Each structure stands twice: as structure tokens, then as C-alpha cells.
Amino acid sequence: MDLTPLVDWFDFGTKPLVIAGPCSAESEEQVLATAKELEKNNQVSVFRAGAWKPRTRPYAFEGHGEPALKWLALVKKETRFLVTTEVANAEHTELALKNGIDILWIGARTTVSPFAVQEIADVLKGVDIPVLIKNPINADLALWLGALERLHGAGIKKLGAIHRGFSTAEKSKWRNNPMWSIPIELKRRLPNLPIICDPSHITGNRNLVGEVCQKSMDIGMDGLMVETHLTPDQAWSDASQQVTPDMLKNIISSLHLRTQDGGTADFEVRLSGLRRQIDAIDKEILESLKMRMEIVKEIGIEKKNNNITPLQLSRMDSLMKERVQLGKSYGLKEKYIEELYNLIHTESVKVQTQIMNDFENDV
């Protein structure tokens, strides 16, 4: 995918790119006052506010719409900020362009709908504007990629992704589980794609925002979108996850930024040696997995000859408990071992099932 590097979008000046502002544009006064307070923080480059707010249930505040775009236009006029807002359909997109919004973002609820994304892409054909796409609410990398591809197909080269976590039934401290492996895989597939972290929606809790900001920097994300409100507890939407401008300044100034390269010669030598050790161990792991799979196939043949099902839950449970205990004795995390052996066992069942199917087709 041919993409314009983030540094060539605008003269942002600082790294990481920081986008900040209230969840919702509540009034002209609120928007301008927040922007002018944030302007004191040189680390913030883009002002955000929601003109439309997709809500789970009706009768909640769903944004002021076009009037809020005019407030953002005032921010652009009276401060140094670029401005950005969320668009969810063709009409939103047309109005945002009409009112001079600098950057658009597509929200998680829209990313899940290819029809809605295509509608937006059709409006943006021939328009040179940056577009950020939030991950879908469910953990589906293909949907995220598909939305990016639709915008790219419309000629948008200034494309970026926003990682805002994924909705799950699992209880945890997160509002939306970060599932860091998914944005990491997206970056692996599209190395030139800028990825911005939205710690506000991941945490749902302003006290955890700093922790997630640091984590996102540790894995090499390009920026942050942090919901910031003058009086967060009085916010009309998502009050608990918004920080004050002072809190944002403290969070950003306390970040420890790391680089992907640029170490000393001694560092590079040590790192190269350690990586060679990992390469050798990985080769042994893969050779062991190959040997294990050969044994799995032999077990599959024995099961076929004795009319035994490939999946045996009691064996799976017993194996998992044993492997978890063994892994813990080596200092490995229980969840890590469980995820690893779930993958191994699932593939083993698939292979043995195929052996059964091949046998039945031959009969």
C-alpha cells in the first residue's frame, strides 16, 4: 500500500503526535476554552472533538452536528491547532469537508460496516485529506485492513490507524481490551502505516491513561489521541475516561520514549549475539513441533483404526493442566502457556480430523 509518511502530512513538529480535546463538542464556549488551555501545551498538535456521537441507546446526547463543526473552525482560526472529528457516513463527511476540518477519523462502530466505509470513501475520491481509521469494536483484523483498503482505493494516501481496543465479554480492568498483538500484526503487514493509540477508550478510566500511553510508545506507535476536558466529571459523554489539560501535560512529559535503532556499536554487537541465540532456539522449537506433529499423525491413524474421535476433552484438560504447571515451574505465565497449547492442540485435532476424513473418502 503506497502511503504518505506521517511527517509529510503537516508540520506537526513534535513526536509523538498528540491529538487532544473533549469527547464531545458541548458548546462553542467549551470547545474554545479547552482549545486555548491545550494550546499552552506545545506537545499537542491537533485538537479533537466529536460533532456526532454514536451512542448505544437513543435519547443520550448524540452531538450537535454541523454547529459543532463551526466551533472547530473557530478553533482552527483562533489557535495554532489543526482540527479533527469523527465521520460516520457520507453526509457527515461532506459537512466536515465544507467546514474545513483538517483530519477525519472513522469510528469503531463504522469500521465494522463495509457499506458505511465505502460511502465515506466515495465522497473522498479526489480529496487530499488525512483519514484515521479506528479498529472495529470486535477483534477482526480483516475488517480493519478492509476499511484501510477502501480508503486507499479512493485515492487517500494520508492514511493512519487508531488503536482503541476491542470489546469482549471477558472481565478485566479495561473498558476495551487492548489486544496489543492485533495492532502489532497490522504494523507488520503495513510497516508504513502510522498507528495512533487511543488510551481513553482502551481504559475507560483516566487513572489508567498514562499506563497505556507508555505501553503504546514502548511498542513503537506513532502518536496518541487523548480525550481531554476542562471539567471531566461534568462531561456530557465518557466522563470517567477524560483527563484535564494539566493531567495530559504530566502524562506526556513523563513518557519514556524509545527508538527502534541508533544504539552504540557495543549495543548492536550484544543485540546481534542475543538474536542469534534466539534464532537457534527458534530453529529447535520448529524442529520439535515438526517431530510432535509426526507423532500426532501416528496417533490419528491409531484413533482411526480403533474408531476413536480426534477430540478427547479429558485428555485435553489433563494435558493443559500438566503443561501449565510445568511452564509455571519454569517461570512462564499461565495465560501464555494456555494460549500456546490451545493453538497446538487445535492444530493437532485438525490434522487428526483430516486423517479421519481421508479414510472415509477412501472407503
Image (tube, helix red, strand yellow):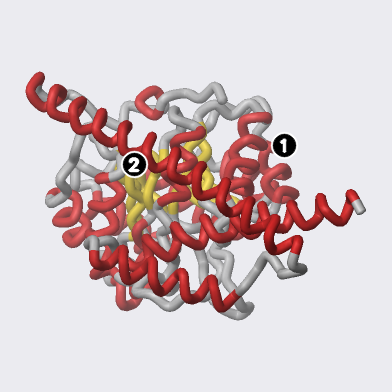
Q: Residue at x 31, y 60 (%)?
A: 228
**Circle 1 — which element?**
helix
Q: Quadrant of the C terminus?
A: bottom right
Residue 308 screen position, x and y as percent: 72, 69
Judge by depth and name the residue closer to the eye, 115 or 170: 170
Q: Is residue 252 above or below residue 306?
A: above
Q: Residue at x 43, y 44 (%)?
A: 288
Q: Residue at x 75, y 49 (%)?
A: 115
Image-based side of 235 in relation to 188, left or right:
left
Judge by depth and name the residue closer to the eye, 111 or 67: 111
Q: Looking at the picture, which amino acid does disc 2 mark? A: Met
Residue 210 screen position, x and y as percent: 23, 59
Judge by depth and name the residue closer to the eye, 149 or 363: 363
- Residue at the disc numbered 1: 122
In the rendering, which numbered label is found on residue 96? Answer: none
Image-based side of 60 in relation to 208, left or right:
right
Marks 2, 1: nearer the viewer: 2
Circle 1 residues within 10 Å: few <14, some 14–19, many ≥20: some
**Circle 2 — which element?**
loop
Residue 253 screen position, x and y as percent: 14, 49
Residue 326 screen position, x and y as percent: 31, 66
Q: Earlier in the sequence, mark 2 or mark 1?
A: 1
- Residue at the disc numbered 2: 221
Q: Residue at x 53, y 45 (%)?
A: 133
Q: Is residue 81 above or below residue 107?
A: above
- Quarter where residue 56 is shown: bottom right
Q: Looking at the picture, which amino acid does disc 1 mark? A: Asp
Q: Is residue 27 visible?
A: no
